[in-house]
Amino acid sequence: MTTATNGFDNKDDDFLLNEWRLPQKKLRGPNRRKGPDLWVQAMTYLSIGGWALLVLAVLMLDVAAPETETFFHRLMKEGPKPGWNVGLKQAVFILVTLCQGLSVAGIMANRHRMRRKTDRFRWDILGLALASAGVGTMLFMLNK
């Protein structure tokens, strides 16, 4: 029996890897896929676009936040502008909702796609769903 570099048997390593895989449907016949098809490419672009929109939403949320008082405000005897930029805050809410919708669509497409043995669950889409839910919750809590 061959041992891996970490001291475990290969059989044990395969068991640990198989434990984290989602159940797969049994299909008959050979695998006829020639490479990444339209669905796999769409999920890749969906994930990249979703993360880009989420980063944009967080940056816009930082710009929409009220200013903090600095040394220059005290020196000029002017206070910072009070309150949030409501227009930007609404745009951030729309972007976060769009990210949430993209991630749910990606999870549904990925779940539909899990038929072959070589298909893997896209954890980046699940991470996008959780991150956009976190930003949405933070935005909801800041809404006063």
Image (tube, rainbow, N blue to C red):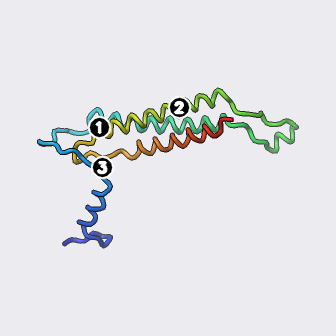
Say left or right for 65 vs 120.
right
Q: Residue at x 74, y 38 (%)?
A: 67
CA–CA distance between discs 1 and 3?
A: 12 Å
Provide the secondary structure element on which disc 3 rests: loop
Q: Residue at x 60, y 34 (%)?
A: 60
Q: Amino acid at mark 2?
A: Leu
Q: Residue 36 location in percent, x, y?
A: 26, 38
Q: Residue 107 location in percent, x, y?
A: 37, 39
Q: Earlier in the sequence, mark 1 or mark 3?
A: 3
Other-residue count near label 2 (Cα within 10 Å), few / some / many at <14 / 14–19 / ≥20: many
Other-residue count near label 3 (Cα within 10 Å), few / some / many at <14 / 14–19 / ≥20: few
Q: Amino acid at mark 1?
A: His
Q: Residue 129 location in percent, x, y?
A: 46, 41
Q: Amino acid at mark 3?
A: Leu
Would you name the residue on which mark 1 appears? 112
Would you name the residue on which mark 3 appears? 22
Mark 1 vs mark 2: give the one in front.
Answer: 1
Say left or right for 22 vs 71.
left
Quadrant location of the N terminus?
bottom left
Q: Residue at x 30, y 34 (%)?
A: 39
Provide the secondary structure element on which disc 2 rests: helix
Q: Residue at x 82, y 45 (%)?
A: 71
Would you name the residue on which mark 2 appears? 95
**Residue 142 vertical position relative to residue 88 in the rendered view, above or below:** below
